Structure formats: C-alpha cells, structure tokens
Image (cartoon, coloured by chain):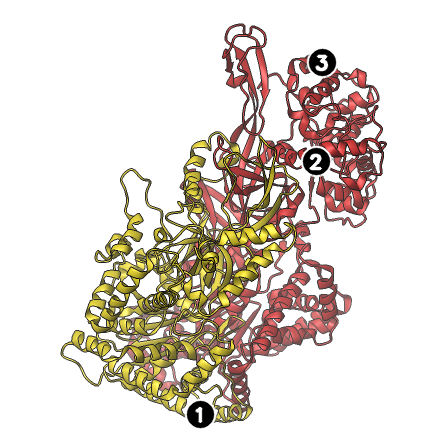
Chain colours: A yellow, B red
C-alpha cells in the first residue's frame, strides 16, 4: 500500500507511530491532531476522505479515516476510558503500553492480558454524540458533495481508493444526476416515494438502487430478531446512517442540533455487537451490569453494523451545508470566491426573481417576498426576541391543488435542507413535533421540529380540513406557533421543559389567513392559470440550466451569511419617516409595522448584495410593504400582523 | 437472615476498622491475629507495613507493635468459624479497644457499609502493583502509620474527629436553623444525644463544619473517604458508647458526611474525582426496584451438614467445591434463606435544568443506594447527593480477557439531601445560598450601593421593549416581592408577600413579550395561556401511574411556580371555572384539592403576572377597566397593580421608539452580548435579594404608610365614597418592602414608601380612572362600578319611580311604553341596559315586578 494513503486507510498506524515516538504522558495527542490537520489541509484532501453520507457502511474499511456531515441529535453521558493502558504477557512478563484513544475495545494480543492495575494507566474522558444526517437535506446537496468527492478521488488515481465501491458508484450517480436534471418528472416520482409519512421505512427504499437497498437493508426485520432499532431521525422517512460520534476535545462547544463535519476513525468492530448480547446474558451474573435497563443498552450501544462509531480526530461546526460554497467563508481563498460571486449578483437575482415569479404563477410581488424569506436568518436575539426571522404566510393558494406541493419542490431545489409539513388533522394529531426525553432508554426521542439551523420548513395549511384536534394536536400546533414567534422549541423532559433556540425559516401556504402566526402575509395573485399545472411546473424546472440553478443555490446560501448595518443618517431618515407615517395614520401604523419594514429593508439590501441600508432601499421596502398591504385590503383580509 | 450475633462481629475487620494501630493488646484479639496470618499468605511477610504515597515517607514506621493493612486484603478468605466463636469481637471495636466497661454481651452490632465498600476491586487495582516496593521502602522510616495508599493515620484521624465532635461549635449558626439545638454547646454532641433519644444511628456531619475546624482532616475525608469514614464511625461510636453505655441501637452509628465543599455540578465530574467524596445536585429521573444483593452466601454440605459462609467477592460467589469436614466433592449447596443480603437500589440522577448550559442535553449519572437509603427518593425529586464516585472497567465477556476500553461510572450514595424539601416544610435556604461565589456577592453588593440601582435594573429588564418604564418598575418589584410575614399565631395565617400584576391593553403592545421575558428570567416561572389552560392544568390532577397503578397527584402550573412567578397570557380568555381557582391562590397562596380521594392543600406562593386584552380588541377609552376587559372585580381587586399598556400617540414617543427599533437591527453581536450579561446579573441580583434581604418596616416608613393610606381614604370621603381599602394598604406595604429589597436594605424607609405610593398611584391613574368624570376612583376595581355610575343608577331609578307614580293608578304598564317615556323625559341618553337595571332596582325595593313585556305595580 502506498505510503501516502496510510493516513487515510490505516490511521491507527500513524497514531501508533506518534504514540511510540513520544512519551505517553506528553502531548502525543496534540501531535496526532496536528498531523491530521496538516494532512487534510493539502489541496482537496478533505475530498479524498470517503464520506459516510454517500457510501454505505459495509463498503467502508473498518478503522479507516472517514468523514461525516451530520446533526447532533442527542448527547450521551461522558464516558471514562483508558487513555493509555498496559498489557502484560503472563508467560514472558513483557509489558507493552498501548493507547486507548480512538478505540472502543482495548486491544491486546492473544497471549496478553490487560493489566488493570498498572500505574501507567491513564483514565481520560470523552463524550458521545448521537448524530444523524442533516434532516431534510436536499438531494442535490448529497449528489454534489458526492461528486466532489468522487472527482477528487478520480484525479488522485494513484492513491488507492479506500473503498472498492467508489468508482462504480461514481458513474452511476453521475448518470442519475443528469437524469434528474433532465427529467424532473422522474425526480418528482422519487419525491413522491419519499413522501410516505406513515413511518413505513421500506417504502422509501428505491428498488432500482441496489446499493442503497443494501445499505437500508438492515431496516428489514428478520423474524427471529428483536424489533428494529428506531434510529431516531427527526423527520419521518429519512434514511442514512445514524452514528455514534465520540468526541475527545472541547465537546462543550457543541450543542444539540449543531451541524458538524467530523473526520475520524470508523469503528465497526463486530465485538461491539457481541458485547451487546453478552452483556445482556451475563447481566444476571454481574451486578455492575444491571445498572442500565435493557432498553437503555439497546439504545446506547446499538450494533455497530447499524450505527457505526466514529472516533473524532477533527470536528468543525458548519455554517452551512451547501457544497457549492467554501466551507469556511473567512479564509483568504473563499474571500475571492465571495467577491467574484458578488460582482455578478444582480443578474442572478433578476434571474431568480423571474424563475420564482413563474413558479408563483406570474406574481412578482410574492416572488420578491419569497426571496426575502429564503435569505432570512435569525442573526441575533434580544432578550427573548429573535431578530431576523421572517415567516411568510403565502395566502390565496388554490385549495386541493398540487400547487403547494410544486412550490415545495422548487424550494427544495434551491435550499440545502427543507421539509414539507402537511397540516392535516391526522398529521397534527398523530405525529410528534416536540422531541421528548425517554427516561427508560435515557435518550432524546426526536420530533419533527428538531431541525438544524436554516432549514426551510414549508407548512402546507391548504391540506387542513375541519376536524377536532386532540391533546397532541393542540400541543403540536402550540409548538409550531412558538417556533414561529420565538424561534425556540420547548423540548419535553417530562419533569420539566427545556428551551432550545432554533433558526428555522417557516413558509406557510394557506387559502385564507393562516391560523399560525406569521411575520408577514402575502396574498397570492396569480397572473396566469396554467391549464395543466403539473406540466407547467415540471417544464419550469427543466428550463433552468443546472449551472444557473447552482448559482441560485449559492446566491441564497451566501447572502444569508453577510453582515449588515444601518448608518446614522439613514436611522434619522427612518425615524422621520415613521413619525410622519404615524401622524398621517396613527391607527394603522404601529411599532410592528416598523419592525417589519426594517426587516424587509434589511433583506432587500442584502438580496442586492448591499451590506448597509440606503435611502433608496428603505423607500423600496416601504413601497413593497404598501403594495402588499393594498393587496390584503383588496382581499378584505384582516391585517396580517400578530405578535 | 442468619443470627445477627455472629455476622457483625466478623465484619468488624472488614474495612480498616480492626486494623486499629493503637491496639495495645494484640494478643487479646485472636481474630486480628488470625487474619494477619491469613493476609500474609497473599502478600508475603511484608504485609504488615503497608504505607502511604511517597509524601509521607519521612514519617517512620514502627514495625512491630502496630500495623495498618491495606483494606482490600481483609476481604480475602476470612476464617469464619473462628471469628464467630470469639466473644471478644462481639462488641463495638471501641468497647474492646478502649476497654470501655460495658457488658460484652449486649453490644451493638456493626452494620456493614456497602456504600463504602462495593467497589473494592477498583481500589485494589491501583495499589497492588507498586505496593510491594513501597512497603519495603517505608519500613525503614517507621513511626507514623498510615493506611496503605493514603496519608491517613488512623489514630490521629480518629482523635481529630473526636475532638471535632466534642468541640465544634458552629460560629455561623443562625437561630432559625436547627431548632432545638443550643448554639453555644458543641453541635455534634447534641446530635449524639439526639441519636440516643431517637435511636436512629446515623450522624450527619456537615463537611463545611469539618473544614472550618480542621482543613487537613477535611482534605483527607474528601480524598480517601473509603478509609476515613470508617475511622469516623469508630470515633463516633467510641464517644457515643462512652457517654451512653446503655443505649440500645439497631446497629452502630454510621457517620454520613454531606455538603462536601467540592460540590460540583454533574458536568464537571472528571476522572480525577474517582474514589473521592463528592456532592452533586440533580433530579431523580428513575429508580429501580429493590435489588437484594447477596453479601455472604451460606453453604451447607449435603452429606455431613457442615456449613460454611462465603463472602461475595466482586459480585461472584466462590462456591466451595470440596467440603472441608467430610471431603466430599460438590456436596455444598447454597441455602438462600440463611445467606445474607443487603438492600440496594439503582437510581438515575439527571442534571438539574438550572445547571445545564443552553443548547445541550442533560447528563445523567447512576447512583447506588444501600440499605436504609433505598427508596428514600422518588423520581422527580431534586436532591443533593454526597457519595463516592466510582469507575469500574467493563469486561466484554467474563471468560475472555478483552476489556472494553471504557469504564462504567456510578456514585455510592452516603447521604441524600432533598433540595426542594422547602415545599413541604418551612424555608430551607441553605441550598440556595451556595449559588453565589464571594466575588459575585461583592459585585452585587457594590451594585446595590449605586444611587440609581432601581432605574438601572428596571431599564435592564426587557430592554428590547421600549419605554413603559412604570410597568417595568412594577414588574421589577414583583420579581423581588415583599417580606414574608407570619401571623398564624393571631389567626390570620401568612400574609401574602407576592405581588400580583395585571397588564391590559391593546393587542400588539408587547405584553406577551414582557411575559415571556419574565418567564425566562425567573428560575421557577411558568407560562400558560388562558385560552389553552383548564382549571386542572393550573392546579393539580390525579393520575394513575402506568407502572405502579398508584394514584399520583400531578401538579399544575400554579403549584409548580411556587416561590416563582406564574405568567398567564390571555387572561380574559380563561373560562369562569378556571379563573375561580385563582381567587384562593391570589390571596391565601394555597390551593385546596379534593378529588379522587385525595384531599389536600398545596402551597402556591406564586406571584401572578397576567395579561389581558380588551373585549373589543381595541381599548375603549370611554369605558372603565372592568368594562373593557370584562373580568370580575373580585379578581381584579386581588391585583396589586393594574397597568394599561396603550399605544401612546405622540410624536416624540414615536421618534424615540423608531430610533430604538432601528438600533435593534444593526447592533453588533458584542453589544448584544453585553445585554445578555445584564440578564445574568439581573437574575443573580434578584435571587440574592430574594434569599438574603428581608426588610422590615421602619418607624418613619410606618408613619408614611399610615399617612398615605389616610390620604387615600380622605380623597374619597370628600365625595362620600370609599376610595381605599385595607387591601390597598397591604399592596403599598408589599411594594415598599420590595423597593427596599432592591436596595439590599434591611429596613423600609420613607423613600421606599414614596416610590410605592407613586407607582400605586400611577397604576391607579391608568386603570381606575372613571372615563366619565376623569376622577381616579378605586371603587371601579373593588366593586366593579365607579361611584358616579352608581349614583347615576340610583338617580335613574328614582326618576323612574317618580314617572310611574305620576302615571297614577294603572296596575300594569307596557315595558316599551315606559322605556320610551323615560327616554323622552331624561336629558341624558338612556340605554336599554340602564333602564333594565333601574327596573331591577325598583323590583328589589318591592315596588314593581317585571313579567315579560309588562310591568306590574305592587
């Protein structure tokens, strides 16, 4: 095996090397991290690392370096492990030091025994996160990041790929990618497939993809097996590996729902699964083992084939998961990327506006607001008040038509993560929105509202019929309302509730005014009614070139991350304006209106790539608001403001 | 259980207890001799000189007379038959060693302490390998003997602890703690006396006391609890049986230290804490059933009936394969009901929500409770646990040597302390006091000396909400609350110290935001919406526990916010029956429940912060508060302050508002951070004031209050109406006290009263102004109707009576006719309601009756 790839294929040999060279008490751990940091900095090296997101676990080499893009779903208790331990050979009395870091099982040769009493033993602490792939991650994110990876590997042909799997998969997926762009109808089919909300996981496995099926195969229940483990994905119908991520450093800085990219050593040691069974059998013997309930054990140490372990060498929080953007925007090279893109911003915006106008049946005002909505993000919190959230209620959507569904598909094509929540009575009453703590298994059982930052949540209220909400339903609607108003979800810990702040873009499509609160209601005014909605929408997506689509994606993700300020002069002008407006019409202009107009102005400026508010933008924002309000008046709807 | 007489004596030697270095008459103690020979089989002859880490190497060991052995060796193969027969071991170690003149037969048995010993093997581990070498090394130095692996000298440790027990007087003790203790007498001697009287053989020792008495002893206790605590037991027992030789206890006294100063939150536990004494706080989330843990197995030979006992070692029983007496193989059978078991329970403790950093899930830790600590806590309890932190490696398979490279951790519980016990009994503030570091307290005190602290705090409160200064001040005072007063001796019970506030006003004036803010600020806040809550949700409900099928009382929002604030949004949307619950809560501060066979009264000492919208969605300035929000005046009068949050229409205000809002949209992260800091400081400031400051009325302040009240009464008396009630006076007192608390002042001064008056007046001005006359009229709130309105009603009734009388003798009148007539006659507009009211008033006077559309004179 070529030496270059050693750190990829056999990272343990590197760690062992560093460990052997230095004193076990010294900073060998730091050296290891630094070594890998250096290696990964080399050009495109991060792309060589096979990703658990793309490659099924059984194609990956155990104990090789892998990466995983994931969301922290739950945090388990910290565990103490043997950082350094000594083995002794009972025959020769030879003692050997080993490191326990990055390992699940203390390794020792057949003739050796671990000396638990050795003075050399170092006990250390690590933290386990239960991670799931980013919920609602769009298909294009997966495809593009996979392509990047595959391309990098292809260009580095000299490096023997760490999996035998990649090349064939690469080809196939490329076809598929094209396939998707060319035949959106097929893609739609796929989405339909994904839309099985009932929780039947098998239905989501596409038969044509052999590999995927194999990877998802472990969902299949074999009759003599205990009931399948619930992998605890927030959204129903999700797939992909869940993973136990063992973090060795600064785990305090990570939070639940953070999106991480981790590089680490994959551990799928079958012993871990045996451990499972053995422990259960022997639990009667050893009083120490009956500490946890069987259920807790099942959840906390699931079979490694199902839930692999990653021992993290490097982990970083991701600002965004858009693979088209550089991972970190503060670096030098990414700055040139940003400035290049900013220079051609206005044509992109114009094109995007045109595209969305078509999608919204020719309503350019609604399209304008949709752009503002898509680039909104909670940028700060003041006391309890989240600033920068911009929930749009798109009212006037035709009932019982596939229109809302198509709107979602278009959004899905544009944003990296999204979810469509169908607000049917049944759905509200039956699904679990709020994550809750299961004390028997000692884990946080996920709910639909456990989403990563900047996920687009499209709530489809046109599906709502008359009917009765039961207790769960009321709780769910309340939680949804709280999410929109305060951008927080109160997780249910049975004895108490705990508040988790979130940052989720909520778009509500409804017929009349939505029953949920929203920052701004836009009434849709279709300019044209296509005779065949389905055909119209699909042709729309086909018409967009993939390269243009990618620009849209970059546009939306990038603008969200820009800074923004207001100069003193403009502040003065805004003040004057507000006082003037209040004078003319004190009844209808309130502080809320000012709030909203400021928000619109903020996003309007950002959408044009401007990071300060100019007088013109302010006027334009007012104009937009006036148009929107006039429309609402026209529809004799109540004013959409609600705190 | 086998005969208690035999087992305890054998146990004696288990922990370091028997290895009493001061034992002068070794010969008198056959068990220890026997044990010594036994021990030597495992460690060789060097064994008697185990010693401590290098730190103590200078202290020489006296090789012959004394020995102190590593505790773990004592577990192995103890000659049981011999022990049982020995009468000498049949007593407390103290009695034997010190030669206390007491009858050897009637001793108190030693109860084994599984809380100290259940993880022996982990201990053994560390010492074994390097032990031999060190033994040799220390042999030459001699003199000071210490328990192996520690720097604990049993004799001096015992002596020190005895001195502590005999002499310690808590200098900081306050009268309200520890009722029944003489503060000038040694505290723990009184405790021992208590043990003698009550017969509960546990001595709880506050580590804080120990630390102030002897820093070094405290350190030893923290670092080597497994060795030191048995020594303490020994010391305590010696003193106790010395004093009360005839006392009969169930077993010997066990010392239970608590409140180890290294109190940490669960998150900061790390590998260094293993095998140390720690105190952590948390919430019980699960408790297992009782696990009988075998301590000692009883085997009997099927052939010759020879019996033997085998101690459990690391969870296993070494079954004797050969009978010692008849040499038959595999003839020994386990006799269950003669084996010894001890109770054990697994408890899962979760970090308390306050300790958790935002955005992370709570950690849990396993606790093992032993013997009588079993079933002392229930899921949901908040407790402080003192215990020994343990870590045990997990074997992948008992038969294979591979070891999973992680340890399982748990805590062996020595002492529980419920932190929320104050809900059941009086006020226990000790736990809350621990919250502040000295620097923090300094900082807060410094802050309190500032002249403008009141304004500062009120502006820090919900700074994103603009203006409404008085409302914020009101809420601030509510957060501090008045002083608790107890008049139960004179029959009035507790006076309410909590301040209730109602906000009403136009929708969209950030009422909900204020409520949310308060709910987020206070540790024990609850937030409910009037629309969604039922009486049951607010009070308590009875539920069947799915597991135990027991009926359980589940508490609702009001009870949960005991000692906190209950924020109720959309107060007006609440239905009648739910609201009626609040009557009791808001004045008596209790909740009575009588359902499903459970009759009880729960404390609900909660402040209520409610928000109500006007009935016509927009506030109608032409109507009174009551008319606007349609709430019963009986409820309204229970609010100390009622504020109107209206949208002021004024240019200067608009301008300031605009600037404020714009600033929200471009402030940098750092500025935001500063704001956030403020919230933390504010929270601590309030918490500190609430638990430490308890202001009393000063002489001048009392006078000022009296004057204020008399003034308020006078205002009304001029117009022949009552304008203030004792309730208003109570409100004033509460507000003044709260204001004094803001200043961290122990005494209410005139300035506090002034501010209370001002705020009270401000609130009244807003809510109790009669819209028809423009006069502030308290009766709007207390009786639901302004005095002028009542007057007008009476006038109308009189006018109607006159009108009817002028109509002459007609016994019946048409309703509509009469209405038209009176309208024509009157110069002010008369509504149908007013007319009907007047009719009703006349009907009450037995002047007429109304039946359908006709009015009949009587």
The local secondary structure at tag 3 comes to loop
Image position, residue B294 (x, y; %): 55, 25
B13 w.r.t. A516: above or below: above
Which sits earlier in the primary sequence, circle 3 or circle 2?
3
Which quadrant would residue B56 be assigned to in this image?
top right
A158 w.r.t. B180: above or below: below
Which quadrant would residue B806 be assigned to in this image?
bottom left
Please tell me which residue is depicted at 68% across the width and 63% down the height of the picture.
B689
Q: Is residue B147 visible?
A: no
Frontmost residue, B297 versus A147: A147
Image position, residue A90 (x, y; %): 58, 31
Please tell me which residue is depicted at 58% across the width and 19% down the height of the picture.
B310
What is the chain identity of the residue bearing mark 2?
Answer: B
Number of the label disc, if any, that sits on residue A581: 1
Dot 1 and dot 2 within a common chain: no
Frontmost residue, A295 versus A89: A89
Real-space Cα distance between discs 1 and 3?
100 Å
Number of the label disc, if any, that sits on residue B130: 2
Taking the image as shown, residue A623 lies to the left or right of residue A188, namely: right
Real-space Cα distance between discs 3 and 2?
35 Å
Q: Is residue A290 visible?
A: yes
Number of the label disc, if any, that sits on residue B86: 3
Image position, residue A316 (x, y; %): 50, 64
Please tell me which residue is depicted at 70% across the width and 35% down the height of the picture.
B130
Number of the label disc, if any, that sits on residue A94: none
Q: Quadrant of the C terminus of chain B?
A: bottom left
């Amino acid at each position: 095996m070529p030496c270059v790839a050693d750190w990829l294929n056999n990272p343990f040999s590197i760690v062992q090397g560093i460990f052997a060279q230095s004193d076990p008490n010294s900073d060998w751990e730091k050296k290891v991290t630094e070594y890998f940091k250096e290696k990964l900095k080399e050009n495109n090296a991060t792309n060589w690392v096979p990703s658990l997101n793309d490659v099924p676990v059984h194609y990956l080499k155990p104990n090789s370096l892998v990466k995983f893009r994931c969301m922290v779903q739950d945090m388990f208790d910290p565990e103490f492990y043997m950082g350094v331990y000594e083995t002794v050979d009972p025959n020769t009395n030879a003692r050997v030091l080993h490191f326990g870091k990055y390992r699940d099982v203390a390794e020792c040769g057949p003739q050796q025994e671990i000396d638990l009493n050795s003075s050399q033993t170092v006990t250390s602490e690590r933290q386990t996160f239960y991670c799931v792939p980013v919920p609602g991650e769009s298909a294009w994110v997966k495809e593009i990041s996979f392509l990047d990876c595959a391309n990098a590997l292809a260009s580095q042909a000299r490096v023997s790929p760490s999996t035998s799997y990649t090349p064939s998969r690469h080809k196939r997926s490329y076809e598929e990618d094209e396939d998707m762009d060319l035949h959106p109808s097929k893609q739609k089919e796929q989405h339909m497939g994904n839309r099985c909300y009932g929780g039947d996981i098998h239905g989501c496995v596409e038969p044509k993809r052999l590999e995927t099926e194999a990877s998802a195969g472990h969902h299949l229940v074999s009759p003599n097996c205990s009931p399948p483990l619930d992998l605890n994905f927030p959204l129903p119908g999700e797939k992909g590996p869940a993973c136990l991520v063992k973090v060795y450093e600064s785990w305090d800085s990570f939070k639940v729902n953070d999106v991480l990219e981790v590089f680490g050593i994959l551990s799928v040691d079958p012993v871990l699964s045996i451990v499972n069974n053995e422990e259960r059998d022997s639990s009667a013997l050893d009083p120490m083992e009956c500490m946890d309930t069987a259920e807790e054990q099942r959840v906390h140490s699931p079979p490694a084939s199902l839930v692999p372990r990653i021992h993290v060498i490097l982990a970083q929080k991701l600002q965004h998961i858009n693979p088209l953007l550089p991972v970190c925007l503060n670096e030098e090279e990414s700055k040139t990327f940003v400035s290049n893109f900013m220079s051609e911003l206005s044509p992109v915006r114009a094109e995007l506006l045109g595209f969305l106008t078509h999608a919204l049946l020719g309503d350019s005002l609604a399209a304008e607001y949709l752009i503002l909505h898509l680039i909104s993000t909670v940028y700060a919190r003041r006391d309890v008040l989240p600033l920068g959230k911009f929930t749009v209620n798109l009212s006037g959507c035709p009932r019982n038509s596939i229109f809302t569904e198509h709107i979602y598909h278009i959004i899905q094509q544009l944003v990296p993560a999204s979810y469509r929540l169908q607000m049917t009575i049944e759905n509200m009453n039956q699904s679990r929105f709020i994550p809750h703590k299961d004390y028997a298994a000692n884990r946080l059982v996920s709910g639909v509202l456990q989403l990563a930052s900047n996920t687009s949540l499209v709530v489809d209220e046109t599906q709502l019929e008359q009917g009765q909400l039961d207790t769960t339903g009321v709780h769910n609607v309340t939680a949804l309302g709280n999410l929109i108003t305060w951008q927080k979800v109160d997780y249910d810990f049975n004895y108490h509730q705990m508040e988790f702040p979130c940052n989720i873009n909520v778009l509500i499509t409804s017929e009349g005014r939505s029953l949920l609160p929203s920052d701004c209601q836009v009434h849709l005014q279709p300019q044209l009614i296509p005779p065949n909605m389905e055909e119209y929408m699909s042709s729309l997506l086909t018409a967009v070139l993939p390269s243009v689509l990618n620009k849209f994606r970059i546009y939306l993700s990038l603008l969200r991350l820009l800074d923004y300020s207001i100069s003193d002069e403009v502040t003065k002008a805004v003040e004057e304006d507000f006082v003037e407006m209040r004078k003319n019409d004190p009844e209808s202009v309130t502080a809320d209106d000012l709030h909203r107009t400021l928000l619109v102005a903020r996003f309007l400026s950002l959408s044009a790539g401007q990071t300060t508010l100019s007088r013109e933008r302010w006027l334009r924002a007012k104009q937009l608001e006036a148009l929107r309000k006039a429309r609402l008046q026209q529809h004799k709807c109540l004013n959409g403001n609600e705190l | 259980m086998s005969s208690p007489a035999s087992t305890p004596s054998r146990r004696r030697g288990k922990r370091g207890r028997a290895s009493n270095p001061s034992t002068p008459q070794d010969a008198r103690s056959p068990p220890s001799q026997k044990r010594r020979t036994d021990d030597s089989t495992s460690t060789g002859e060097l064994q008697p000189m185990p010693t401590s880490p290098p730190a103590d190497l200078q202290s020489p060991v006296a090789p012959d007379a004394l020995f102190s052995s590593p505790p773990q060796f004592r577990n192995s193969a103890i000659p049981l038959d011999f022990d049982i027969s020995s009468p000498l071991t049949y007593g407390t170690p103290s009695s034997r060693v010190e030669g206390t003149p007491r009858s050897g037969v009637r001793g108190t048995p030693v109860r084994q302490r599984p809380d100290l010993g259940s993880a022996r093997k982990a201990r053994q581990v560390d010492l074994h390998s390097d032990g031999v070498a060190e033994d040799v090394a220390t042999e030459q130095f001699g003199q000071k003997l210490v328990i192996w692996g520690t720097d604990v000298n049993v004799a001096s440790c015992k002596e020190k602890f005895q001195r502590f027990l005999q002499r310690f007087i808590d200098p900081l003790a306050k009268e309200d703690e520890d009722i029944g203790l003489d503060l000038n007498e040694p505290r723990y001697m009184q405790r021992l006396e208590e043990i003698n009287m009550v017969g509960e053989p546990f001595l709880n020792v506050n580590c804080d006391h120990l630390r102030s008495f002897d820093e070094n002893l405290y350190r030893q206790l923290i670092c080597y609890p497994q060795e030191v605590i048995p020594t303490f037991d020994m010391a305590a027992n010696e003193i106790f049986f010395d004093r009360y030789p005839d006392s009969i206890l169930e077993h010997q006294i066990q010392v239970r230290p608590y409140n180890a100063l290294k109190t940490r939150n669960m998150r900061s536990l790390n590998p260094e804490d293993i095998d140390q004494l720690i105190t952590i706080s948390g919430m019980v989330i699960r408790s297992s059933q009782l696990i009988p843990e075998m301590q000692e197995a009883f085997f009997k030979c099927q052939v010759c009936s020879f019996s033997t006992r085998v101690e459990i070692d690391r969870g296993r029983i070494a079954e004797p394969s050969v009978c010692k007496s008849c040499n038959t193989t595999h003839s020994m059978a386990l006799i269950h009901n003669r084996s010894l078991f001890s109770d054990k329970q697994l408890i899962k403790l979760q970090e308390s929500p306050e300790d958790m950093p935002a955005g992370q899930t709570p950690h849990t830790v396993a606790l093992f409770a032993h013997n009588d600590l079993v079933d002392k806590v229930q899921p949901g309890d908040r407790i402080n646990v003192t215990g020994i932190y343990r870590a045990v490696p997990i074997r992948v398979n008992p038969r294979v040597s591979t070891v999973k490279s992680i340890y399982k951790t748990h805590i062996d519980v020595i002492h529980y302390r419920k932190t929320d016990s104050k809900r059941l009994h009086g006020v226990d503030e000790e736990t809350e006091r621990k919250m502040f570091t000295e620097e923090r307290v300094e900082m807060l005190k410094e802050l309190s000396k500032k002249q403008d602290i009141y304004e500062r705090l009120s502006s820090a409160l919900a700074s994103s909400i603009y203006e409404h200064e008085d409302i914020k001040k009101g809420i601030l005072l509510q957060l501090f609350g008045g002083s608790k007063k107890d008049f139960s001796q004179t029959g009035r019970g507790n006076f309410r110290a909590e301040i209730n506030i109602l906000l009403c006003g136009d929708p969209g004036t950030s009422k909900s935001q204020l409520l949310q803010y308060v709910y987020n600020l206070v540790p024990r806040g609850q937030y409910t919406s009037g629309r969604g809550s039922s009486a049951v949700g607010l009070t308590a409900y009875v539920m069947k526990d799915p597991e135990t099928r027991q009926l359980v009382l589940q508490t609702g929002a009001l009870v949960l916010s005991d000692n906190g604030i209950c924020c109720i949004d959309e107060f007006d949307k609440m239905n009648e029956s739910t609201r009626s619950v609040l009557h009791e809560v808001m004045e008596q501060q209790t909740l009575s429940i009588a359902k499903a066979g459970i009759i009880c009264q729960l404390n609900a000492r909660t402040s209520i912060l409610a928000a109500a919208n006007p009935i016509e969605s927009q506030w109608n300035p032409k109507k009174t508060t009551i008319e606007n929000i349609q709430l019963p005046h009986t409820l309204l009068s229970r609010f100390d302050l009622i504020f109107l949050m209206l949208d002021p229409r004024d240019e200067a205000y608009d301008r300031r508002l605009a600037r404020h809002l714009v600033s929200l949209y471009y402030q940098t992260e750092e500025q935001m951070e500063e704001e956030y800091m403020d919230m933390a400081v504010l929270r601590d400031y309030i918490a500190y004031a609430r638990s430490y400051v308890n202001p009393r009325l000063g002489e001048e302040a009392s006078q000022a209050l009296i004057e204020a009240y008399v003034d308020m009464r006078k205002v009304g008396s001029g117009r022949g109406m009552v304008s203030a009630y004792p309730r208003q006076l109570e409100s004033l007192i509460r507000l003044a006290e709260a204001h004094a608390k803001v200043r961290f002042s122990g005494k209410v001064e005139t300035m506090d009263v002034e501010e209370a008056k001002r705020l009270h007046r401000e609130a009244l001005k807003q809510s109790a102004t009669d819209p028809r006359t423009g006069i502030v009229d308290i009766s709007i709130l207390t009786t639901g109707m302004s005095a002028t309105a009542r007057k007008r009603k009476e006038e109308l009734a009189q006018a109607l009576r006159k009108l009817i009388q002028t109509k002459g003798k007609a016994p019946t009148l048409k309703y509509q006719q009469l209405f038209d007539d009176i309208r024509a006659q009157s110069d002010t507009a008369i509504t149908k309601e007013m007319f009907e009211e007047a009719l009703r008033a006349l009907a009450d006077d037995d002047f007429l009756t109304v039946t359908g559309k006709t009015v009949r004179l009587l």
